[in-house]
Amino acid sequence: MKIAFVGIGLIGGSLAITLKENGFASEIIGVDIHQENLDKAIRRRIIDRDATLQQALQEADIIVLSTPVDAMLQLLPEILDQVDQQIVIDVGSTKVQLLEKVKDHPKRGRYVATHPMAGTEHSGPEAAIPNLFDYKCTVICDAELSDKDALELVQKMYESIPMGIVHLDSTSHDVHTAYVSHISHISSFALALTVLAKEEDENRIFELASGGFSSTVRLAKSSPDMWIPIFRQNRDNVLDVLDEHINQLARFRSLLIKKDFEKFYSLIQESNKIRKILS
Ligand code: NAP
């Protein structure tokens, strides 16, 4: 199976490494906006060779769209215009706008919308790693709109990693990812800005940062090139959960002002319920 990745960064690169290693892909073709990324990917043996988008479309059995989500809005219809029996998938973090864009495309059936739920705060081909997706889950959206053979092959591809598969409609996908993924990034960006604003001595941050601080601001190292398009596309859902987050912060603030540590204690206890859900 020849697989072409359009956008050979963290997610495309990590998927490419995994599918080549486990034998699902016989050849990996890389397409990217910057030749430098392709050169790095060849040096790191993430891809077997680079190609133009047109060459890749002629040669690959599966085309994986792994660019930031804004570029996908333009690339997906262009790619579907040119496919025959090949299968096209995306790995983007938002789905409603992308699926709307191709809902009436005559080749809509050849496309399967997916979101492998794994990542790190790093980006680019240098960030690609094996095993990133092991035993995590992939969301497949609006599966009934994909051709049966395309859907089956894509499910087989993710199961080969191995990953679990969750089916959602695109609207629910964007709501739930706003809750469990997008808000935690805003929270981490805001925490990093808070500490940078209050602690003028950067050496102190470095010296005193313990595991707790490092793990809560880890996501603040993420690239704005990847995240701004996500916030643009999922703005309404993110605003909804951000309002709730601000309410929660205000509750803690008000309890501190009132010195109501009993209530503060019970709020922390309530938040500890997350331990049971995630363990
Ligand atoms: P990334 O590391 O920045 O990789 C994206 C790659 O696409 C880069 O090499 C980028 O090049 C290239 N690119 C940008 N525009 C392009 C275009 N028009 N044509 C071809 N290549 C283009 O980002 P990523 O973290 O892998 O994210 C890729 C996708 O996966 C995104 O849609 C994201 O929403 C989704 N996703 C991300 C995560 C995560 O945690 N990071 C998790 C799940 C899904 P330059 O950087 O040189 O511009």
Image (tube, rainbow, N blue to C red):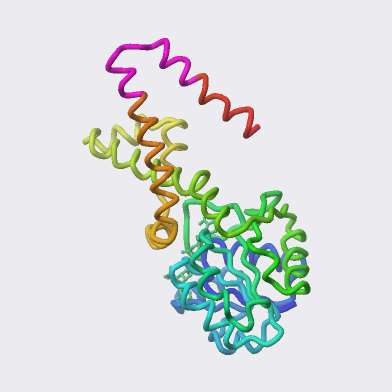
Residue 113 screen position, x and y as percent: 62, 66
Give the quarter of the image for residue 15: bottom right
Residue 159 or residue 131, whichever sits in front:
159
6 to 135, vertically: above or below: below
Give the quarter of the image for residue 4: bottom right
Query: Quick check: is 111 in the magenta stretch?
Result: no
Residue 119 screen position, x and y as percent: 55, 53
Query: Is residue 114 toward the left or the right of residue 61 in the image?
Result: left
- In the rendered image, which quarter contains the N terminus? bottom right
Residue 22 screen position, x and y as percent: 76, 63
Residue 102 or residue 188, whichever sits in front:
102
23 to 30, vertically: above or below: above
Furthest-left residue in this view: 200
Instruction: Provide the major secondary structure of the magenta segment.
Output: helix
Kindly identify the residue that appears in the image at 59 percent across and 74 percent down: 5
Q: How many marks?
A: 0
Magenta segment range?
A: 252-268
Query: Quick check: is 260 in the magenta stretch?
Result: yes
Kindly identify the residue that appears in the image at 72 percent across and 61 percent down: 158
- In the rendered image, which quarter contains the C terminus? top right
